[in-house]
Image (cartoon, grey):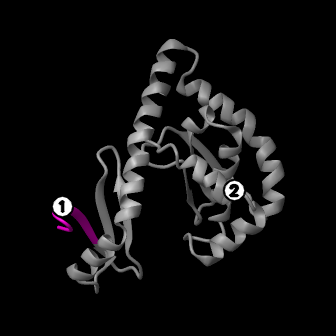
Amino acid sequence: MASGETVLVIRKRIANVYLRVKPPDGHLEVTAPVTIGDDQIRAFIDGKRRWIAATRERLTRSRHVYARLEADDQLQPGRSEAEAKRILQERLPTLLDRWVPVVGRRPGRISLRKMKTRWGSCTPATASIRLNTDLAWLDPDLLEYVLVHELTHLYEHGHGPGFRARMNRYMPDWTERRRRLNRYLAL
């Protein structure tokens, strides 16, 4: 419990503490090294209160965006999962032609599917990238950002200094694109 709030704490053999605000209700989840005590976790969470509040606000706003997208889907029968995949499959070859030479790595496989909590993910061991089909309904440059982000994970497994340095080199405006993408939450 932190500040009167129940927090799910998962202890693993890792080096850093990770805090997540989980949809749909905004509950907190912490993944922490086995060596860190409860008091340290509470202090960590307390130090992130502004970030937690901002993330929960984005979550609330994104619910409204997704409700609107779902309403649009009902009004536009062609706006289906199949249509989203078709749009993405149409856009990806051009993006890959542009970004694979820049990043220097080609994915072994790209799969498209509806994801509840992420815009994309990468498994470096198999060079597999997964993209959320909801990217089809957002600005195309946000799809481009997510693709470059996941291609960068073929080099860098986390989001540390190496990852940020590569992203700065590949796509200098990536933080602005990330900020725009974060107006939405994959739900």
Q: Between residues 151 and 6, which one lies in front from this camera angle?
A: 6
Give coordinates of residue 89: x percent, y percent. Answer: 69, 35
129 to 7, vertically: above or below: above
Specify the quadrant that holds the C terminus. top left
Which of the labelled discs sits on residue 58, or is there none? none
Magenta residues (range): 1-10
Badge 1: how crowded within 10 Å, few (<14), some, or many (20+)? Answer: few
* Near-viewer residue (65 or 31): 65
Name, please, the residue furthest toward the front: 50
As drawn, 35 above or below 181 = below
Q: Nearer the viewer, residue 64 or 33?
A: 64
Q: Which of the 4 image quarters holds residue 43?
A: bottom left
Element under disc 2: helix
In this view, 41 is above or below 185 = below
Kind of element beneath mark 1: loop
Most common secondary structure along the magenta stretch = loop
- Asked if the magenta segment contains residue 168, the reply would be no
Residue shown at 37% from the left, 51% from the top = 56
Q: Is residue 154 left or right of residue 72?
A: right
Q: Amino acid at mark 1?
A: Thr
Q: Residue at x 67, y 51 (%)?
A: 145
| Count of numbered marks | 2
Foreground mark, 1 or 2? 1
Q: Residues under labels 1 and 2: Cα distance?
A: 36 Å
Counting residues from the start of the chain, the first of labels 1 and 2 encountered is 1
Find disc 2 in the rendering and name its residue.
148
Identify the disc placed on residue 6.
1
Rendered view: 69 above or below 31: above
Residue type indicated by callout 2: Val
Image location (x, y in percent) of residue 109: 65, 50
